[in-house]
Image (cartoon, grey):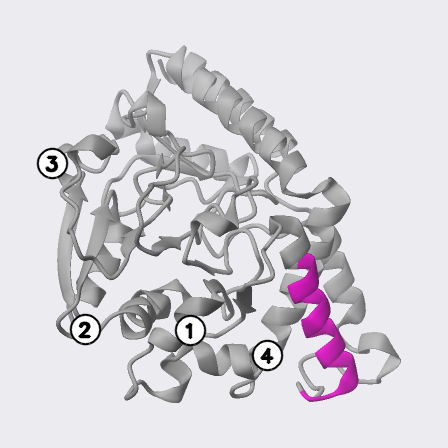
């Protein structure tokens, strides 16, 4: 079997151990004679799996007892709408910190349901920095404050948690489980699965229980967090295969030493990649030093005429999905939990060789 080093921003790499377990389980899960995709979500075995996934996730992130852990469908994009639908009314104002494309999209979704105050906007510098918190223009009576702790496209990450007295809502799709977080500081955390959790098709939502009763009374059932909390996320038939893979990933994370160990590994991976970029005149990274992402590392070649050659030769060397997002160009290495340190070392070695040959 020949595996490449996959630097995709999402769907992203999965741990090889997890993939091998899936391969072995696929035709006959737990001796049932059926695939996990074929069993009832109401069966005892699957209910046990779902409970284990939640318990392991709670352990990994030390989720307090007064929070619900939900596994709905729809991805983070659906949660961009569910946040205002569950936390505000038409006349309410919600504050948004916009430090990238996903924060901008979330604010746009919210305008359909409530008044939106963009308290900070980093578009003036092409989303390469985080405006100082002292400059944020926050509302006096906001229903909540929303931000995106890690922006996958521009490679900007918050290394602090915003303060305040209103519920804090965070789209952690691209850095969830990459390091410890204090869940108690958040009202709501949501994350699409396809970066650090599992395959696309399932979403993680962690919500403080006292917020569950703020939903609009006319919300559709599937757009109401409380409906998932009351049904153990089985309001309708859930994405059983994605849930199964998420459970395997959570168990894998525990075996690695949990999010504390992953934080150390991720710090090493990103530090050595940024060092390779910063010590070169051939590569550069446009993001301010104090908010560089540990998960998504964009970089630019000094001569963009070499971009195509870089991508072709890196792919031939087994380093895939390094093309930057179409909106910004250049290159981007997404180095989520399942991307090994060996993969980052291989990328750095290739970059050095490419510079020698073309610099």
Task: Using residue 233 as the reference point, say whether residue 91 is left or right of it.
Answer: left
Horizontal and vertical percent for residue 354? 44, 21
Q: Which residue is mark 4?
A: 232
Q: Which residue is mark 3?
A: 124
- Mark 2 or 3: in front is 2
Are the residues tagged 4 and 2 within 8 Å (C-beta)?
A: no
Q: CA distance from mark 3 to mark 1?
A: 36 Å
Q: Disc number at residue 212? A: 1
Numbered range of the magenta stretch? 42-56
Quick one: 59 or 312, which is closer to the camera?
59
Secondary structure under tag 3 reads: helix
Are the residues tagged 1 and 2 within 8 Å (C-beta)?
A: no
Q: Is residue 182 above or below residue 77?
A: above
Q: CA distance from mark 1 to mark 2?
A: 17 Å
Q: Which residue is mark 2?
A: 113
Quadrant in which the C terminus appears: top left
Secondary structure, magenta segment, majority class:
helix
Q: Residue 94 lies in what quarter of the image?
A: bottom left
Horizontal and vertical percent for residue 293? 41, 34
Task: Using residue 253 as the reference point, say whether residue 255 is left or right of it.
Answer: right
Mark closer to the chain start, 1 or 2: 2
Q: Residue 291 lies in what quarter of the image?
A: top left
């Amino acid at each position: 079997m020949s595996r490449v080093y996959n630097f995709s921003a999402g769907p992203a790499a999965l741990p090889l151990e997890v993939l091998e377990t899936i391969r072995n389980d696929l035709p006959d899960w737990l001796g049932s004679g059926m695939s996990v995709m074929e069993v009832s979500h109401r069966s005892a075995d699957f209910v046990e799996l779902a409970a284990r996934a939640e318990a392991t996730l709670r352990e990994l992130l030390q989720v307090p007892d007064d929070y619900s852990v939900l596994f709905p469908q729809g991805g983070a994009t659906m949660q961009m709408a569910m946040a205002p639908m569950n936390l505000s009314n038409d006349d309410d104002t919600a504050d948004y910190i916009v430090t990238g494309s996903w924060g901008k999209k979330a604010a746009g979704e919210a305008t359909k349901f409530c008044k939106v105050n963009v308290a900070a906007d980093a578009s003036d510098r092409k989303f390469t920095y985080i405006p100082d918190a002292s400059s944020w223009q926050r509302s006096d009576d906001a229903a909540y404050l929303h931000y995106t702790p890690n922006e996958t496209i521009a490679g900007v990450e918050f290394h602090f948690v915003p303060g305040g007295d209103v519920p804090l809502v965070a789209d952690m799709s691209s850095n969830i489980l990459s390091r410890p977080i204090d869940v108690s500081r958040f009202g709501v955390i949501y994350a699409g699965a396809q970066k650090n959790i599992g395959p696309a098709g399932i979403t993680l939502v962690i919500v403080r229980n006292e917020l569950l009763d703020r939903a609009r009374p006319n919300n559709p059932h599937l757009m109401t967090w409380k409906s998932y909390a009351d049904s153990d996320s089985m309001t309708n038939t859930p994405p059983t295969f994605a849930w199964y893979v998420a459970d395997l990933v959570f168990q894998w994370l525990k075996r690695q030493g949990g999010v504390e160990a992953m934080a150390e590994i991720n710090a090493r991976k990103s530090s050595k990649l940024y060092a390779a970029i910063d010590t070169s005149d051939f590569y550069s990274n446009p993001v301010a030093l104090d908010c560089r992402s540990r998960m998504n590392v964009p970089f630019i070649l000094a001569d963009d005429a070499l971009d195509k050659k870089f991508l072709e030769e890196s792919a031939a060397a087994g380093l895939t999905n390094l093309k930057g997002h179409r909106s910004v160009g250049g290159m981007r290495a997404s180095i989520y939990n399942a991307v090994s340190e060996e993969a980052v070392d291989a990328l750095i070695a290739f970059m050095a060789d490419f510079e020698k040959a073309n610099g």
